Image (cartoon, grey):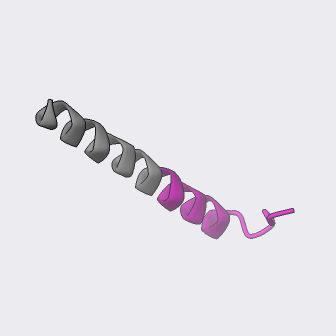
Amino acid sequence: YPLLQGTFLVITISAVIANFVSEIIYVYLDPRVRYE
């Protein structure tokens, strides 16, 4: 089912982007946070 596959792909990409953006915002708001 191409439609289902495409939807899953979009959701996955959106989740990855959202996670990446939230990490950037978190580090920006709290400069004390550093990657170990």
Occupied quadrant, residue 12: top left
6 with respect to 27 (left or right) = left
* Percent x, y of residue 6: 20, 42
Q: Is residue 17 magenta?
A: no
Q: Is residue 29 magenta?
A: yes
**Residue farthest to the right, as pictured:** 36
6 with respect to 13 (left or right) = left
Q: Nearer the viewer, residue 32 or 24?
A: 24
* Percent x, y of residue 8: 29, 36
Q: Residue at x 43, y 52 (%)?
A: 18
Occupied quadrant, residue 1: top left
Q: Residue at x 87, y 62 (%)?
A: 36
Q: Specify start and end residues of the magenta stretch as a single range.
A: 19-36
Q: Nearer the viewer, residue 29 or 12?
A: 12
Q: Nearer the viewer, residue 35 or 30?
A: 35
- Image label count: 0
11 with respect to 3 (left or right) = right
* Percent x, y of residue 17: 42, 56
Q: Main secondary structure of the magenta part?
A: helix
Q: Is residue 25 above or below residue 14?
A: below
* Percent x, y of residue 4: 19, 31
Q: Residue at x 80, y 66 (%)?
A: 34
